[in-house]
Amino acid sequence: MTKLASEWEVSCPCCNATLVLDLNLRRVIAHREPERTDKPELTEAERILADEAARREALFQQSVEAERTRGDALSKRFEEALRQARTEPIERPKRDFDLD
């Protein structure tokens, strides 16, 4: 692409991308991201996919176990609330005009 006199190349201070600005249009007309230094190698793709699959499986098993024990925890909380309700005395609720 031919560079015009009104075009300036500027590098972004936070992401090091190269921006091409047109002073006449007052806009960014091109953007080039810098080369990544942490690109994975194609030969490691199978290992990366296997690691991600194992991580997903572990998270799934963890959620399955949490769902199994969730019912037990809810029933324990219900039993505790029921026991507490039986031990408390039954009172009539206070109304606003009873307080006068």
Image: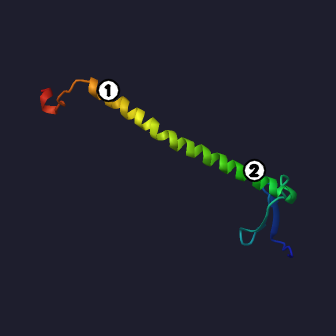
- Residue 80 visible in the picture: yes
Is 95 positioned to the left or the right of 37 in the image? left
- Name the amino acid type tagged 1: Gln
At 48% across and 40% down in the image, what residue appears?
Answer: 70
**Picture colour scheme:** rainbow
Q: Earlier in the sequence, mark 1 or mark 2?
A: 2
Q: Residues within 10 Å of mark 1 (few under 14, many from 20)?
A: few
- Residue 16 visible in the picture: no
The answer to whether 2 is drawn above or below residue 32 in the figure is below
The answer to whether 17 is drawn above or below residue 6 in the figure is above
- Name the amino acid type tagged 2: Asp
- Extreme-bottom residue of the structure: 2
> Secondary structure under badge 2?
helix
At 18% across and 30% down in the image, what residue appears?
Answer: 94
The residue labelled by disc 1 is 84
Is 68 positioned to the left or the right of 91 in the image? right
The answer to whether 74 is drawn above or below residue 34 in the figure is above
Disc sitting over residue 51 in the figure: 2
The answer to whether 32 is drawn above or below residue 70 in the figure is below
Which of the 4 quarters of the picture holds residue 96?
top left
- Identify which residue, 26 or 72, lies in the foreground: 72
Residue 9, position in %: x, y?
83, 64
- Identify which residue, 67 or 9, lies in the foreground: 67
At 51% across and 42% down in the image, what residue appears?
Answer: 68
Dividing the image into 4 quarters, which one contains the C terminus?
A: top left
Disc sitting over residue 5 in the figure: none
- Identify which residue, 48 or 57, lies in the foreground: 57
Dividing the image into 4 quarters, which one contains the N terminus?
A: bottom right
